[in-house]
Image: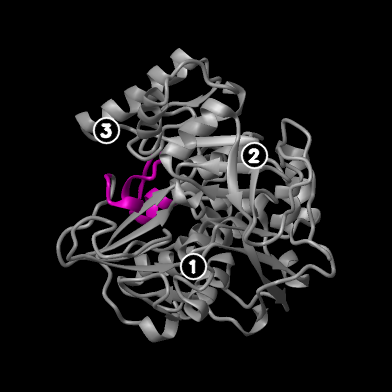
């Protein structure tokens, strides 16, 4: 019987000879990367100390990124980042990215060649599945589980069932990877892939570049998925060749792989999508949300602060201004993305349009800083969650959308189809 991508990657990382990689089975495995940030890292460090402390088994596998409270907005945030610095120094963690040295972890790690195709990646953040865009198996884990990985260089997994999403057709105008995952969430709901792997393949995958694939994989966890990935192709290999700092493997599903369900998506028939408050599954076509006044537009996050996103924003803002009464905040995902955007003149264009451009940070995505919302405010954001209270005051409302739609809302001061702006 053939295997899915998730099953094949787990198979290649087994620690027990003879272990059977089938859905529902428990297997022991080693990981290639243990990824922690300044929210979950300090908690994992305390678990590590409570387990006995000592040296980290494989410090070369640990990647520490200061991104949520970076730059520190207050004393508690400064303490969390300080904990990251101290642990990195004490344990000899080479892959430590401080304020101004990197960016947002899920974009940064593959950009730096630290996550490559075929990897098994464990992270303290729920959006570690973003690694699936690069052909890796990425999953969020408990903070105690992350501590155990640092101590033992191993962990366990229940092998997930897989769901197959077949993409076909040419992308319609203003449709992006963000719309693909929003449509899926609208169809299967926030528990539609509970503890499963969501596997995207088919000829339509070629329509999506790596950045757009990140948007898909980033939000698979919003459907309850354990992991998910876009089947590797020439685009994946080109990215790996340009960035990988170690050997990589392009893992594809077998033709006779078994799936819990199969789904077909015609990209040509799609429209830009919007997730209304207060759930990523509350999805409608942009036309059904048009006219909603917007106080703030937040463009950026780990999967939608990419260079592709910034170029999409620029294409809408060109020669236009942010509407009076509406604020626009743009956040490049990494320092490298920021630098390239400056070289292309995008940052200057954003500022000329009346938008604020900030340093790479998760800040407002989780309501921490750099754009948290007040009571009663309405925002369009390219982030991944719009639960009540997620982005600031519990009385605020957040609509999720792609970068074209977000930029159009910034110009119009309300949700609008970017095609008719």
Residue 228 image-quadrant placement: bottom right
Res 70 label: none
User: Would you name the residue on which mark 2 appears?
Assistant: 115
Q: Earlier in the sequence, mark 2 or mark 1?
A: 2
User: Would you name the residue on which mark 3 appears?
Assistant: 77
User: Would you name the residue on which mark 1 appears?
Assistant: 223
| Cβ atoms under marks 3 and 2 closer than 8 Å | no
Residue at 22% across, 57% down = 373
81 sits to left or right of 111: left
The region drawn magenta spans 350-369
Quarter of the image with the C terminus in it: bottom left
| Cβ atoms under marks 3 and 1 closer than 8 Å | no
Question: In front here: 402 or 203?
Answer: 203
The spot of residue 389 in percent (x, y) is: 24, 60
271 sits to left or right of 119: left
Residue 25 image-quadrant placement: bottom right
Can residue 307 be spotted in the picture?
Answer: no
The spot of residue 331 in percent (x, y) is: 42, 47
Distance in Å between CA atoms under marks 2 and 1 = 23 Å
Residue at 65% across, 66% down = 162
Distance in Å between CA atoms under marks 3 and 2 = 27 Å
Q: Is residue 200 above or below residue 106?
A: below
The spot of residue 184 in percent (x, y) is: 54, 75
Tag 1's secondary structure?
helix
117 sits to left or right of 379: right
């Amino acid at each position: 019987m053939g295997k899915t991508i998730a099953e094949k990657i787990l198979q290649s990382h087994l620690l027990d000879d003879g272990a059977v990689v089938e859905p529902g089975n428990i297997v022991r495995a080693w990981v290639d990367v243990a990824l922690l940030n300044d929210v979950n890292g300090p908690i994992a460090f305390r678990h590590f100390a409570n387990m006995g402390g000592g040296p980290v088994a494989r410090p070369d596998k640990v990647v520490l990124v200061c991104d949520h409270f970076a730059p520190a907005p207050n004393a508690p945030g400064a303490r969390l980042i300080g904990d990251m610095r101290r642990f990195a120094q004490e344990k000899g963690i080479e892959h430590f990215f401080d304020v101004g040295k990197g960016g947002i972890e899920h974009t940064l790690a593959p950009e730096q060649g630290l996550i490559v195709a075929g990897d098994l990646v464990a992270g303290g953040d729920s959006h570690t599945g973003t690694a699936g865009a690069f052909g890796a198996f990425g999953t969020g884990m408990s903070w105690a589980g992350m501590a155990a990985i640092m101590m033992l260089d191993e962990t366990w997994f229940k092998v997930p069932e897989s769901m197959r999403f077949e993409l076909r057709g040419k992308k319609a105008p203003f449709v992006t990877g963000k719309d693909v995952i929003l449509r899926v969430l609208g169809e299967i709901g926030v528990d539609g892939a509970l503890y499963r792997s969501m596997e995207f393949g088919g000829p339509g995958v070629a329509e999506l570049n790596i950045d757009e694939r990140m948007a898909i994989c980033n939000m698979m966890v919003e459907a309850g998925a354990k992991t998910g990935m876009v089947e590797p192709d020439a685009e994946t290999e080109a990215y790996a060749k340009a960035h990988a700092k170690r050997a990589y493997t392009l893992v594809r599903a077998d033709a006779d792989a078994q799936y819990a369900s199969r789904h077909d998506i015609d990209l040509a028939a799609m429209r830009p999508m919007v997730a209304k408050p207060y759930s990523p599954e509350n999805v409608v076509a942009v036309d059904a949300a048009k006219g909603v006044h917007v106080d703030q537009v937040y463009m950026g996050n780990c999967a939608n602060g990419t260079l592709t996103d910034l170029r999409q924003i620029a294409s809408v803002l060109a020669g236009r201004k942010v509407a009076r009464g509406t604020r626009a905040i743009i956040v490049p995902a990494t320092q490298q993305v920021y630098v390239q955007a400056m070289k292309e003149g995008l940052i200057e264009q954003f500022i000329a349009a009346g938008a604020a451009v900030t340093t790479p940070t998760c800040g407002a995505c989780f309501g921490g800083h750099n754009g948290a919302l007040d009571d009663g405010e309405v925002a369009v954001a390219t982030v991944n969650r719009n639960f009540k209270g997620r982005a600031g005051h519990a009385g605020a409302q957040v609509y999720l959308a792609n970068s074209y739609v977000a930029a159009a809302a910034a110009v119009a001061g309300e949700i609008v189809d970017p095609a008719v702006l």
